[in-house]
Image (cartoon, grey):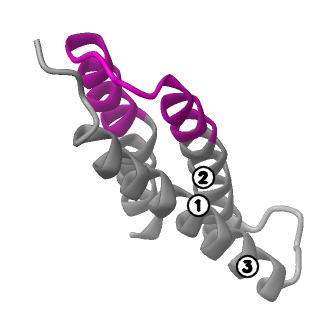
């Protein structure tokens, strides 16, 4: 059942990750605020592209070329992966209390 699996991934990417990042940024003080802004932009672009690509891959309501849909899927996932890696770097750049 690919649609249920896609919904689970969309919820994990769109809700759980953003929630965890928000809690972290609320609790800790980050030294370099520009990295947080870059992380936020990458995360949102990646999440929208990945979930949009996943939706098109599973349903393809516009009958788009499969290669185009796969590229959107891969690019979105790659951008989101970069956002996760940047968040890992940011966790080491917190100010000591």
Mark 1 lies on residue? 79
Taking depth in this image into account, of 67 and 74 the one nearest to the observer is: 74
Question: Would you say the residues marked 2 and 3 are in contact, meaning their CB atoms lie under 8 Å apart?
Answer: no
Q: Determine whether, in the image, residue 46 is placed left or right of residue 17.
A: right
Stretch of the chain drawn in magenta = 15-41
Q: Residue at 49% of width from left, 23% of height from top? A: 33
Q: Toward which corner of the image does residue 52 lie, by quadrant?
A: bottom right
Q: Residues within 10 Å of mark 3 (few under 14, many from 20)?
A: few
Mark 2 lies on residue? 46
Q: Residue at 87% of width from left, 83% of height from top? A: 65
Question: Would you say the residues marked 2 and 1 are in contact, meaning their CB atoms lie under 8 Å apart?
Answer: yes
Q: Toward which corner of the image does residue 94 lie, by quadrant?
A: top left
- Indicate the secondary structure of the residue bearing disc 1: helix
Q: CA distance from mark 3 to mark 1?
A: 12 Å
Mark 3 lies on residue? 71
- Indicate the secondary structure of the residue bearing disc 2: helix
Q: Residues within 10 Å of mark 1 (few under 14, many from 20)?
A: many
Q: Residue at 45% of width from left, 28% of height from top? A: 32
Dot 2 or dot 1, earlier in sequence: 2
The image shows residue 93, relative to residue 29, as above or below, that is below
């Amino acid at each position: 059942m690919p649609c249920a699996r896609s919904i689970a991934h969309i919820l994990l990417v769109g809700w759980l990750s953003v929630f965890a990042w928000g809690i972290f940024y609320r609790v800790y003080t980050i030294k370099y605020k520009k990295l947080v802004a870059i992380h936020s932009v990458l995360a949102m672009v990646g999440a929208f592209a990945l979930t949009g690509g996943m939706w098109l891959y599973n349903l393809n309501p516009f009958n788009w070329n499969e290669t185009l849909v796969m590229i959107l899927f891969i690019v979105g996932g790659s951008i989101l992966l970069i956002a996760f890696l940047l968040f890992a770097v940011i966790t080491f750049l917190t100010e000591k209390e």
